[in-house]
Image (spheres, coloured by chain):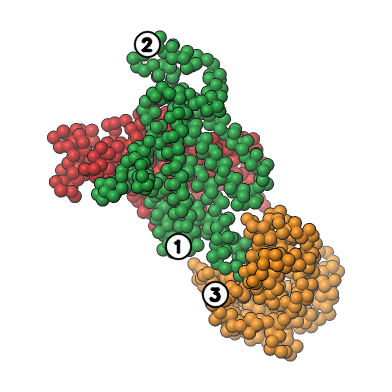
Chain colours: A green, B red, C orange
Amino acid sequence: MYRYILRRSLSGILLILAVSLATFFLMFAGGDPATRMAGESGSMADVIRIRQAYGFDRPIIVQYLSWLGGFVTGDLGRSLYFDMPVSAILVERMLTTMRLGAWAILLAIAIGVPLGVAAGCRPNTKVDRFALLFAVVGQAMPTFWFALLLVIAFSVTYPILPSSGLDSWKHYIMPMVVLSYFAAPAIMRLTRSGMISVLDTDYIRTARAMGIVPHKILLKYALRNALIPVVSLAAAQFGYMLAGSVVVESVFAIHGAGRLAWESILRSDLPVIQALVLCFSLFYIVLTFLADVVNAWLDPRMRIA
Amino acid sequence: MSAAPVMPTAGAKSMVTLILPRWRQHTGFMLGFCVLAVFALMAILAPMLAPYDPYAQDLMARMRPPVWMDGGNWQHPFGTDQVGRDYLSRIFYGARVSLFVGLSVTIISCLIGTALGVTAGYFGGRVDTVISFLITARLAIPVVLVALAVVALVGSSLQIVIAVLGLLLWDRFAIVMRATTQQIRSADFIVAAKVQGASNFQIVMQEILPNVVNNLLVVATLEIAQAIVLEAALSFLGIGVPAPTPSWGLMIAEGRADVFFDPWLITIPGTFLFVLVLATNMTGDGLRDITAPEGRNR
Amino acid sequence: MNATDMLLDVRGLRIDIPTPKGMLHAVRGIDFSLKRGETLCLVGESGCGKSLTAMALMGLLPRKALRRADMLSFQGTDMLSLPERAFNRLRGDRMAMIFQEPMTSLNPALTIEQQLIDVHRQHRNVSVKEARERALFLFEKIGVSAPTERLKQYPHELSGGLRQRMMIAMALMCGPQLLLADEPTTALDVTIQAELLRVLRNLQEEFGMGLILITHDLGVVSRMADRVAIMYAGEIVEQGDVHQVFNRPSHPYTRGLLECLPIPGRHKHMTHLPSIPGVVPSLIGDFVGCAFRERCQYAEERCAAPEIDWRQLPDGQGYQCIHPVDSFGAMHSAAMHEVSR
């Protein structure tokens, strides 16, 4: 078990390095960053000054290493727009986004898993049809449009929920519903198909032949095995959800990391964008790592791998 | 047992005759496919169908409500937008943008993903390790954010949006193609082709690709839907297709300011977007059910 | 025979499965019974309905399968009218079953201990400790080495043979009166097969269980059975005391099966093992007459008659055939001798 975790974390670190490299080169996607920072009115002298100030004149590999070194020690660079350390801006925004995301993924699991179990236990019944409809609609619903529909319904037509900000629990409802409806369909579908295939296995037949009561077969013998792939999926969905918070936060005017990313992109505030991309990737990698650990606990066969 | 390789063409043909009756029985597929066809016609025939030039502004006729609301008339069935452009015409042309982006992005990402996936699955070993790592790294990168950043940095245009999304969305192709290729790598007809001295390239092109084309089609359909949604999202955030192109995402963004008074500006393009994505997904899911071997769980 | 000696009595059991092509009559009216401590072997080719019969006895048929019977009585309880809940209380307690696939029949996510204890505590009001002791007691009987370590292990850490021993232990946790074993050794190595069969027979004798053993292996039958029932195409075509049936097979199919046995000395050059020509008829739709007639060398017009009567011999042997084959005695007692060695 410990060896598995060790090996898994080593590959995680390798992954972080690869992603950080990609993120670093993002900076050069639009050509020379110094010219961009100087802006259209900047003179050649400005460009050269910026180049020296930010170290763009150094070899690329040196720049990358110093940027990465800074990242490891918590120095994420300096925001061009706010003219303050990125880390000072980032932490609070990131926490806001993660808090919202955590509630949303919990809601998605709370809806997706029971619905998937109900559908998987009785395929081709009314419950199953309803669950599939729920999933198909959810997967086709663009998040920003769904968010706006909710605003139209609950802030305009029946004004019972606030449409912007994140000040009270009421503010959380609509963004939470939007984000969780983004994640729930896939969770529901995987739970359903997992349940169908697990209930068809020989070991469930054994449990039935031993007279284990149906609800115990379902909860202890089947669900545990059916949920193994769902854990990985939920972790990945959580990661995507945070990265996708750009859209939701812009609709609901939430001051989170997603909105910060959007604003920084509009302002060409490269250090902030880089830091955010890397943070989201890092978060995704850590989440999938944790999911693998949970799975190793759920499925003893994985521990040797 | 004879060493003659199974001819992929013959296999594909019998596959079609075998599957054909299943098409009609699958309501989801038929429904999705028909709706998709309607949207495709809408896009192709947009110049003929659209009553107005989608770019023509008429400041005297701004914010006309659609026909089913008070004050609406058949002159502008879906009303007009903030600068008096005919909403119906923009919807028709919007179908063009959505489908064009969906198809182009999918073609690019299909080429990248299939090349990577088949290579990994076919050669295995170290090649597989490297490509699998690449796939995992790609999954860790937040698509929306990176696409936004790159489009913003490079400059937004339809081509840039397509290129960026195409370069980012190859993961599902790679994953599925890798798995499928692994499954058939040791099949008899591949071994037979090897014994007969076919080169790796020949084997991949003549033996493997024809046999994974079903899976490829399923992934491609689902990927078109994803590309359409992402384009709309980027445009909605103002960093996708530039104005005044009639993109549904952009139309929703433009209507946002009036959400409190004229929500139809949002609901009309949103409904079209939703129905198109729904139909595409249903077609893809249906294709998967239909091409799955008999007895596989639907 | 004393009535209380009767453990299981099955009359006219039929199993129908709806398929897209029509109704599949998988089991077509079979009768058999089992006494306490007796071993009955159900023998037949795959698809003859022997596994479905066992599943029907356990009440574990697939949801769409239809079970009908004139009588299905277990220890005097009418199983036909038994509600599912009450049936579930019998399963694992008074009747239990072992399956063919030891590799997939145990839950991969739970330790052996958890699975064994769950079974015991499902049916008996015992503590975890008592259940564990019961498991260890059975391990000793079954011949499991390092029993306490085994309890803590997961199925994937055990060999196929050990897993099947765990299955046996699980089935015996509550000391059932009836044990059904569906090809319990088919998936295992020959040496382990022999060992497991010995264990099974010893346990059966010690606990006085009735055992229904499903197999296609006549060698297993000769070693284990008191009585044997030969199944073909959803029917029992011959049944009786194992020695009688083996020495004096009456149904041509039984005879054919016995001739297919490789016996040293009988076939000098093992290149030509005899086999029964032809294939089993489809059981979809209505079927009349003797199902074996297409493959039977003695077949005649009468064999297509709608009802072929069951003929009962005074010594308990019975068969379903118009023209039984006789007097193979000498040859097959030799065969029997070889097989049982």
Vertical arrangement, residue B209 with respect to residue C67, above or below: above
Marks 3 and 1, Cα distance to the nearest angstrom? 23 Å
Marks 2 and 3, Cα distance to the nearest angstrom? 86 Å
Where is residue A300 shown, x and y percent of the image?
Answer: 65, 51
Residue at the spot of label 1: A124
Q: Residue at 45% across / 31% down in the picture?
A: A90
Q: Is residue B277 visible?
A: no
Vertical arrangement, residue A299 with respect to residue A248, above or below: below
Callouts 2 and 3 on one subunit: no
Residue at the spot of label 3: C84
Q: Is residue C69 visible?
A: yes
Q: Identify which amino acid the numbered label 2 is placed on.
A: Ser
Q: Residue at 16% across / 46% down in the picture?
A: B72
The reply, left or right, for residue A73 in relation to residue A258 is right
Where is residue A2 shown, x and y percent of the image?
Answer: 67, 43
Q: In the depicted view, which residue is nearer to us: B223 or C102?
A: C102
Where is residue C11 shown, x and y percent of the image?
Answer: 61, 83
Marks 2 and 1, Cα distance to the nearest angstrom? 69 Å
Q: Identify which amino acid the numbered label 3 is placed on.
A: Glu
Q: Residue at 76% across / 60% down in the picture?
A: C147
Vertical arrangement, residue C207 with respect to residue B165, above or below: below
Residue at the spot of label 2: A43
Q: Identify which amino acid the numbered label 1 is placed on.
A: Asn
The numbered mark 1 sits on a residue in which chain? A
Outermost residue to the top:
A45
Q: Residues within 10 Å of mark 1 (few under 14, many from 20)?
A: few
Q: Nearer the viewer, mark 2 or mark 1?
A: 2
